[in-house]
Image: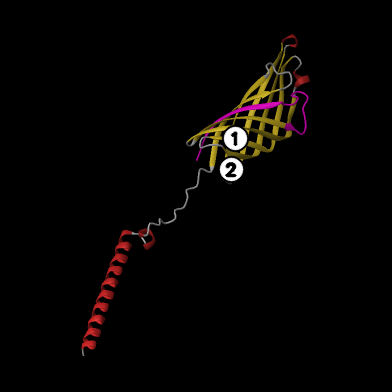
Amino acid sequence: MKLTKLFVLVTFFAALTATSALAETTSDSLDGKKSGTSSSDRAGKKPAQKKAAGPKLRVDGIGVLAMGMKDAPSPGVFGFGGAVAYRLRRNIEVEGSLISFGYILDYADANTTVEISDMAINADGIYRMPLSSTFAVRGRGGAGMNIVSVKAAGDFADEFTSPSKNLFALNLGGGVEMNFGKFFIAAEIRKPILLTSIEAMGNISILLCGEAGMRF
């Protein structure tokens, strides 16, 4: 009889303990759902967050100093242009650009002026290597088409004037870049390798380029 009473008491307390634990677990689960957290959050684990992607698009203006143009009145010829680039991967961009430069020759003795202009349309691949959060080096390679025209006015204009010519070229170069949030500035040295040449212009030795723009 005593054993029966003891068994009943033990069973009663066990059932009471299990009921209390189940009620506490149910209450915690409801509280977790209301607060928008899971059991893993309460254990100190934070839910994985998707890493925000960086800017994909880059737009910039370009200032150019073309060196080595034939008979140019100064060692360097100034020009300007612009570029739009899209980031394919973390360090790789594809860029389309347009650059225009030229100069005027004045043959006073012959009463003739000659205007030589070059508009380059380029498609390049760029590899960026960040060295810090603000500083990076980059290299480029690609191809382009140079639209060269020679126009003359004066007594001997017919001897100098020639129709526009399309010259294909390979583009190689590299430089440095500094970033300030979405804005950046860059400096590059580029070497266009003309696959064909034109007597009036000769070959371009190098292009010194300064850039400023922003990323979106």
| Other residues around mark 1 within 10 Å, as few (<14) / some (14–19) / many (≥20) | some
| Other residues around mark 2 within 10 Å, as few (<14) / some (14–19) / many (≥20) | few
The residue lying at 44 percent from left, 55 percent from top is: 48
The residue lying at 50 percent from left, 47 percent from top is: 53
Compare residues 53 and 168 and report the one nearer the observer.
53
The percent coordinates of residue 202 (x first, y second) are 76, 24
Q: Residue furthest top?
A: 109
* Residue that numbered label 2 is attached to: 91
Residue 150 occupies quadrant: top right
The percent coordinates of residue 197 (x first, y second) are 77, 29
Compare residues 131 and 120 and report the one nearer the observer.
131
The disc placed on residue 137 is 1
Residue 172 occupies quadrant: top right
Report the amino acid beneath label 2: Asn
Magenta-tinted stretch: 193-216
The percent coordinates of residue 98 (x first, y second) are 62, 33
Q: Up-down: is 5 above or below 71? A: below
